[in-house]
Image: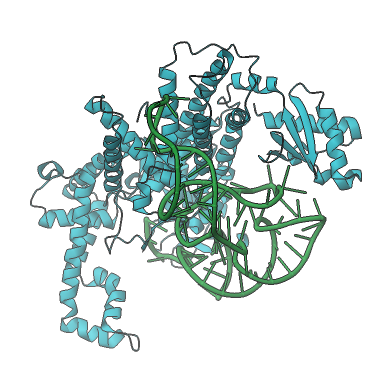
Chain colours: A cyan, B green
Amino acid sequence: MGNFQTKLKTDFVLIFKEIYDVDIDDSAVIVNQTKPEFEGEYTLVMFPYSKQLSKAPQVIGNEVGSAFKSKAYIDDFNVVQGFLNLKMSNEFWIEQIHENHLIIENTNDSSRKIMVEFASPNTNKPLHLGHIRNILLGWSVSQILEKAGYEVVKTQIINDRGIAICKSMLAWQLYGEGKTPSSTDIKGDHFVGDFYVLFENKFQEEYKNWQNSSEAESLYLDSKKNEESQDDYFKRFKNDYFNQYSQLGSQAKQMLLDWESGNESVVSLWKMMNGWVYEGFEETYRRLGVEFDKLYYESDTYLLGKKVVNDGLEAGVFYKNEDGSVWIDLEDAGMDQKIVLRSDGTSVYITQDIGTAMLRYQDYKMDEMVYVVADEQDYHFQVLFETLKRLNQPYANGLHHLNYGMVDLPSGRMKSREGTVVDADDLMNEVIAEAKANTDERGELSELSAIEKTNIVEKIGLGALKYHIIKVNPKKRMIFDPAESLDMHGQTGPYIQNAFVRIQSILRKVEVKNSNDFADYLVLDIEKELVQLIMDFPFVLQNAAERLDPSEIANYSFNLAKHFHRYYHEVRILKAESESAFNFRILLCQKIAESIEESMKLLGIEMPERM
RNA sequence: GGCUCCAUAGCUCAGCUGGAUAGAGCAACUGCCUUCUAAGCAGUAGGUCUCAGGUUCGAAUCCUGAUGGAGUCACCA
């Protein structure tokens, strides 16, 4: 790792050995950035060694500091309480700015392969805000892992079968009048989603009517719980009605059975409608700037787990119940008994996941696997991972569940029934429109062509939206305020893009960019802070990769942009006081821009040249 | 009810391997565009880090308990 902090630690350990003849663990050494109110840039904490050496922390600090002074990179030191503050030499900063801190030396065993699953939508509805968080996290984590030296395979499992899509299909058959996305000029996924909603509405209507029948009356009177109102009762009864009484319900279920038995007309209807949905999804993905290496479809994998279950039965991982259902007992691992095969021999959700995991291993031989799935499925993945472990899968110790928190609106949880779901396409359109309005008002782009303008406005709008979502720690449930997501000031994507744009604007005005003639330049404090930030990149990246947490990169980018904006305001760059100052500052600006661009790229956010 | 996760400024969030006086942004208020793009900068104000114990040189951070909130506990996915 080309990380200077690591070098500081090892030097500290050597010094300790030399002057005290004591071995300490370099991983326990604490290096911080010196607080601005003290002199110096790096701080080592001495308290932990006080007891071991029976010396006051201040004394240790002074002794270690004196030893450090022989290093060329140290200029001076001071000790406050138990904190040893190191002031780096000017040459150190001059040297560091020449280094490329964006190159990550891979310390992992050479090129481990990791598969990342994200997005994974159902094909009966368009994508919404929740998918956007999922997709941004999955994409970003993929980029981060790749940068950290992994070979990454981006994948998803598309839930293209089941009762839900059959509802859309049936509604289209009954009420669609042969319309298509192109005949109505509606995006394919929305088109199919509209029929899903239509089905629900028609079903509700049918259900309401039925509730007035004598059959319904007597059922209510016979099987209501005491004091239960008719409304409550029928709310509870909805599923049973769908399965046992509903006309529409039985037609939809019949359609599912027909599909499973391979009925030609149903299958071709299914293919046509899913095709429409995929066209719509494709457009949304393209706009979001994401792509996948390999798609898996549930229609191909939903039968897969069965063979595994049979093998597992022989190996004693599973057991069979009297009724023929198959289970796994995970109680000794603190979990429950879980069913893996129904008594009728069909597989359940987790069985499919087991089968899919094995198929993926056959295809890619990955060492690790990341599932980007909301935290409501925490337990499911605990069970899945434990099961895969017991089945002795080679990647079983490399399984990760990136369990992000769900997205709430200021009004509470999104509910499709109440129509509060925020649609992904609408959201993108809105934020891009806002970016366009702001851009027009500023007038900076008035000389550019319409195409260039559109291009930039998209980058800004999507930058705002993506940053707003990705800056939040994935583990946390987040509250998404649409009004706030339109903001382009303060800690936002456009603020960071603006720092980059300002640098580009400066660089456009410079004729010769590669003059490295500034060895005599005395680096300013604010410039040291900026170089220090640039030097931090590998450290931040490593953390983000280990924790599967893009928000660390987001915070880092903001920090860098913030420092740059202050620098830009305080220090003349183009009109620097000397040639060496000019040369240094131009190179510094280039380095800052590169670091901003690289870290934002890891978040899936592009930089415009102007804005 | 069992298990899991969460609780930091009015709001949205940082603060993670325990370290110095807990930080940003938004909203509010005050300044700064003849000067490299004001999507910017500087400043004011805003805190019992939910509460109570414990661990130690030192706790927002680790442990225990309480309170409040969320999720989950299907032969659903």
Q: Position of residue A594 (x, y in %)?
A: 49, 25
Q: Position of residue A9 (x, y in %)?
A: 75, 33
So how many labels did they put on this image? 0
Q: Residue at x 44, y 43 (%)?
A: A490
Is the residue A538 above or below the residue A167 in the image? above
Is the residue A34 above or below the residue A527 in the image? below
Is the residue A247 above or below the residue A306 in the image? below
On the question of residue A151 being in view, the answer is no
Answer left or right for A206 relative to A106: left
Q: Position of residue A349 (x, y in %)?
A: 41, 55
Give whichever of A63, A20 is nearer the camera: A63
Answer left or right for A377 relative to A56: left
Q: Residue at x 52, y 41 (%)?
A: A555
Answer left or right for A193 relative to A344: left
Q: Position of residue A428 (x, y in %)?
A: 30, 43
Figure quadrant of residue A465: top left
On the question of residue A61 being in view, the answer is yes
